[in-house]
């Protein structure tokens, strides 16, 4: 029996009230061996070794075709496409008409997109009997934004500087939330807080600090 989780999310329409988002609860991850065994148990016409061999052949050929620029459609599963992007050690460049700032050595395959076949969605929906699981509520902020900024100022006065993870700990925020909020704070000159450095070495200082 599958369960769904009702999650409270921030209202994106600016109406004030929070909104509900639903997701499937995942019990655990099925590894290849167990999945193949379940396929065999459901359809005994193929041995587990044949199923594993077919799966290996399929993934190998899929990788080859995607690597050579093909889009692959597998009926009942979906359409696969390779995605490319900059290598990890390369910085994002501006668009140039002559195209000389980047070459193939700067790019790599970063993932694979899958546009799921509608028939697969129908098959899942047909076999899916949902029941209600847990609710996930938004954590309520203990401090207002103004209070968080003032707490940050006090921390910097005491310690000389502040890092983003310290701001998160100080105000009970997730690190990603703290990072986004610090961008807003440092872009507002009224906050009295500025940043120096970049990425993991970024420090937050008071405007009157040299």
Image: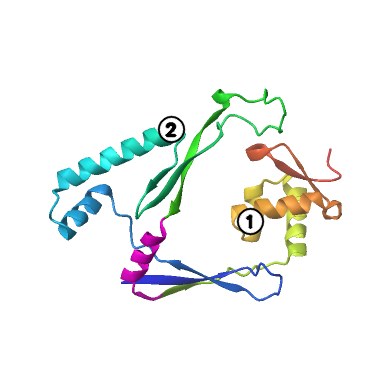
Residue lying at 69% horizontally and 40% vertically, measured from the top left: 202
Secondary structure at badge 2 equals helix
How many tags in the picture? Answer: 2
How crowded pointer 2 is (Cα within 10 Å; few <14, some 14-19, many 20+) is rated as some
Q: Position of residue 154 (x, y in %)?
A: 76, 54
Residue 91: quarter of image: top right
The reply, left or right, for residue 36 in relation to residue 95 is: left
Quarter of the rendering occupied by the N terminus: bottom left
Seen in the picture, residue 132 relative to 179 is either above or below; the reply is below
Q: What segment carries the magenta color?
A: 117-132
Q: Position of residue 44 (x, y in %)?
A: 13, 56
Q: In this rendered view, identify the residue nearer to me: 166 or 107.
A: 107
The reply, left or right, for residue 17 in relation to residue 55 is: right
Q: Position of residue 17 (x, y in %)?
A: 66, 76
Q: In this rendered view, identify the residue nearer to me: 182 or 108.
A: 108
Residue lying at 59% horizontally and 57% vertically, measured from the top left: 174
- 131 drawn magenta: yes
Ranked by sequence position, the earlier of labels 1 and 2 is 2
Residue lying at 21% horizontally and 55% vertically, measured from the top left: 39
Circle 1 residue: 177
Circle 2 residue: 67
The reply, left or right, for residue 136 in relation to residue 175 is: left
- 190 drawn magenta: no
What secondary structure is the magenta-colored segment mainly? helix
Q: Position of residue 182 (x, y in %)?
A: 72, 52
């Amino acid at each position: 029996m599958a369960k769904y989780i009702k999650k409270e999310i921030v209202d994106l329409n600016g109406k004030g009230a929070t909104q509900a988002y639903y997701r499937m609860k995942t019990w655990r991850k099925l590894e290849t061996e167990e999945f193949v065994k379940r396929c065999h148990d459901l359809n005994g016409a193929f041995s587990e070794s044949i199923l594993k061999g077919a799966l290996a052949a399929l993934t190998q050929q899929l990788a080859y075709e995607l690597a050579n620029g093909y889009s692959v459609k597998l009926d009942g599963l979906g359409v696969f496409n390779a995605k490319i992007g900059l290598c990890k050690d390369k910085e994002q460049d501006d668009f140039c008409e002559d195209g000389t700032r980047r070459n193939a050595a700067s790019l790599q395959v970063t993932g694979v997109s899958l546009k799921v076949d509608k028939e697969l969605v129908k098959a899942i929906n047909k076999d899916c009997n949902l029941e209600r699981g847990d609710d996930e509520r938004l954590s309520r902020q203990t401090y207002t934004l103004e209070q968080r900024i003032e707490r940050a100022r006090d921390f910097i006065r005491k310690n000389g500087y502040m890092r983003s993870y310290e701001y998160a700990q100080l105000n009970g925020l997730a690190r990603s939330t703290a990072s986004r909020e610090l961008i807003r704070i440092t872009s507002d000159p009224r906050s009295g807080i500025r940043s120096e450095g970049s990425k993991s070495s970024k420090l937050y200082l008071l405007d009157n600090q040299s």
